[in-house]
C-alpha cells in the first residue's frame, strides 16, 4: 500500500521525541510525513518544516486540522509530540476533524484535559493511539504471551522500576525545565516515567491493581513536582506489587525493568538487555529467551543483530498503520485511550495516597 500521509504537532528543530517519532514512522516505510505545525512560533515552525522537507507548514494546529481535513490528499494521521499540557487541544481538534491521533504519553497533564480527549475520541470516527513504546519491544510481547498462556501459573508478585539520574540537580535546559514545571508536565517523575512502569506491568500481566499506597518525594529542594515515587500495589485477585520510579537516582541512565513471579515460574526483563528475557521455572533451571524464540513477529533483523529503543516505537507505528489500513489484529497490543486513562487514574491515586501519608486508595477503573 501507499505510505499513509502523516502530520506532526510539535517536534520542531532540536526536539528529542519529535525526531524519535519521525525516525520510527519511516523505518518500515508505511508513513510519509507531509505536514506539520512544528512550533507555536510560526517562524520557527516554517524553518523546521523546511529542514525536514515538509510539503505543508502551518502556524497553528487548529489551522492544520481544518485545512488537512478539507484536502483530498490531506493527512490521515497526526503525531502529537508536545509537552503534556499541549496534548489535549490538538488531539481534540484532529479527532473532531476525523484524523487519527498518535499521541506521546502520558495522556494529558490534568484529569480535565484527559476527559476532553476521551470525549472527543469516543465521538470520533478516527482512532486514538498512545505511544508507550516499551510495551512494543519483542521480548515484552513474548513475556505477555507467556503470562497469558499460563507459563507462570497464577501471578503473585509484580515489580516494575524506572530509574534515572539526570534530574539529580536543579533543572536546566529545555527538556528538564518543562518536565519540572507543574503547569506543563502535571506530575513529575510519576507522569513522565511512572506511567511507563504502570503500563508495562499492566500490559504484561493483563491485570490492573485495585488499590495502591504511595510516597511521592521532591528530593531536590524547591522542586515543585515529584522526582521520586515508591508505590505499593494490591491486585483484586490477591497479587501484590510495587513500582519505584526516580529521576534523582544518581548513576542510573534509563533503568527500566520488570519482574513477575507466579506459582509456577518467574520472568525478568531489563531494558539494558532488552533482547533477553529470563524465565525461571520453580522446579528447573532458568531459561534465557532471546528474539530467536520471540513469537510476536515484531523484529526486523535476524537474532543477534540488536534492535532497541527506536524499533519499539517503529513496532507501534507499523501496528498503527495496519489498523488504519483495516487490520484490527494488532489492536489488543497497541496502547490507546484506555491505557491513557488508566495512566491518569494511576497518577491521581498515587497523588491522593501520598497526600494522606501513604493511605491505601482505590485506583479508579
Image (cartoon, rainbow, N blue to C red):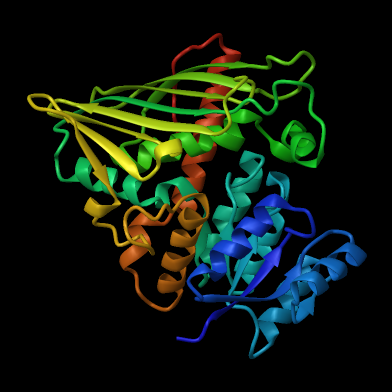
Q: Is residue 266 above or below residue 250?
A: below
Where residue 121 appears, x then y in whole percent?
54, 61
Where residue 112 appears, x then y in whole percent?
65, 43
Where residue 185 appears, x then y in whole percent?
70, 38
Residue at 62% x, 29% y: name it.
189
Q: Is residue 199 left or right of residue 61?
A: left
Q: Between 138 and 303, which is closer to the camera in this rendering? A: 303
Q: Is residue 336 visible?
A: no
Q: Residue furthest left?
A: 283
Q: Is residue 99 left or right of residue 302?
A: right
Q: Specify the quadrant that holds the C terminus.
A: top left
Residue at 50% x, 44% y: name it.
341
Q: Is residue 256 visible?
A: yes
Q: Between 322 and 343, which is closer to the camera in this rendering? A: 322
Residue at 82% x, 31% y: name it.
172
Where residue 109 appears, x then y in whole percent?
66, 41
Q: Between 182 and 290, which is closer to the camera in this rendering? A: 290
Amino acid at each position: 500500500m501507499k505510505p499513509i500521509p502523516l502530520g506532526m504537532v510539535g517536534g520542531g528543530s532540536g526536539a528529542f521525541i519529535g525526531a524519535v517519532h519521525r525516525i520510527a514512522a519511516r523505518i518500515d516505510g508505511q508513513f510519509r510525513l507531509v505536514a506539520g505545525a512544528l512550533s507555536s512560533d510560526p517562524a520557527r515552525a516554517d524553518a523546521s518544516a523546511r529542514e525536514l522537507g515538509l510539503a505543508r507548514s502551518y502556524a497553528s494546529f487548529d489551522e492544520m486540522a481544518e485545512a488537512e481535513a478539507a484536502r483530498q490528499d490531506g493527512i490521515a494521521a497526526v503525531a502529537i509530540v508536545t509537552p503534556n499540557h499541549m496534548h489535549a487541544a490538538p488531539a481534540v481538534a484532529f479527532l473532531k476533524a476525523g484524523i487519527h491521533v498518535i499521541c506521546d504519553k502520558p495522556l494529558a497533564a490534568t484529569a480535565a484535559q484527559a476527559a476532553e480527549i476521551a470525549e472527543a475520541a469516543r465521538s470520533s470516527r478516527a482512532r486514538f493511539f498512545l505511544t508507550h513504546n516499551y510495551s512494543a519491544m519483542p521480548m515484552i510481547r513474548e513475556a505477555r504471551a507467556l503470562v497469558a498462556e499460563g507459563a507462570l501459573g497464577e501471578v503473585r508478585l509484580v515489580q516494575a522500576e524506572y530509574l534515572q539520574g539526570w534530574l539529580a540537580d536543579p533543572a536546566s535546559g529545555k527538556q528538564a525545565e518543562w518536565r519540572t514545571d507543574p503547569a506543563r508536565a502535571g506530575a513529575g517523575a510519576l507522569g513522565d516515567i511512572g506511567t511507563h512502569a504502570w503500563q508495562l506491568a499492566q500490559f504484561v500481566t493483563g491485570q490492573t491493581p485495585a488499590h495502591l499506597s504511595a510516597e511521592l518525594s521532591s528530593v531536590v529542594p524547591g522542586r515543585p513536582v515529584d522526582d521520586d515515587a515508591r508505590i505499593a500495589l494490591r491486585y483484586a485477585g490477591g497479587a501484590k506489587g510495587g513500582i519505584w520510579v526516580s529521576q534523582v537516582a544518581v548513576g542510573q541512565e534509563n533503568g527500566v525493568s520488570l519482574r513477575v513471579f507466579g506459582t509456577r515460574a518467574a520472568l525478568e526483563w531489563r531494558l539494558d538487555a532488552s533482547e533477553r528475557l529470563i524465565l525461571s521455572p520453580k522446579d528447573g533451571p532458568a531459561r534465557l529467551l532471546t528474539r530467536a524464540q520471540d513469537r510476536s513477529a515484531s523484529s526486523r533483523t535476524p537474532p543477534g543483530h540488536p534492535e532497541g529503543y527506536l524499533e519499539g516505537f517503529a513496532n507501534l507505528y507499523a501496528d498503527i498503520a495496519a489498523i488504519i489500513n483495516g487490520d484490527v489484529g494488532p489492536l489488543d497490543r497497541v496502547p490507546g485511550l484506555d491505557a491513557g486513562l488508566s495512566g491518569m487514574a494511576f497518577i491521581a491515586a498515587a497523588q491522593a495516597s501520598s497526600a494522606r501519608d501513604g493511605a491505601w486508595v482505590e485506583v479508579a477503573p
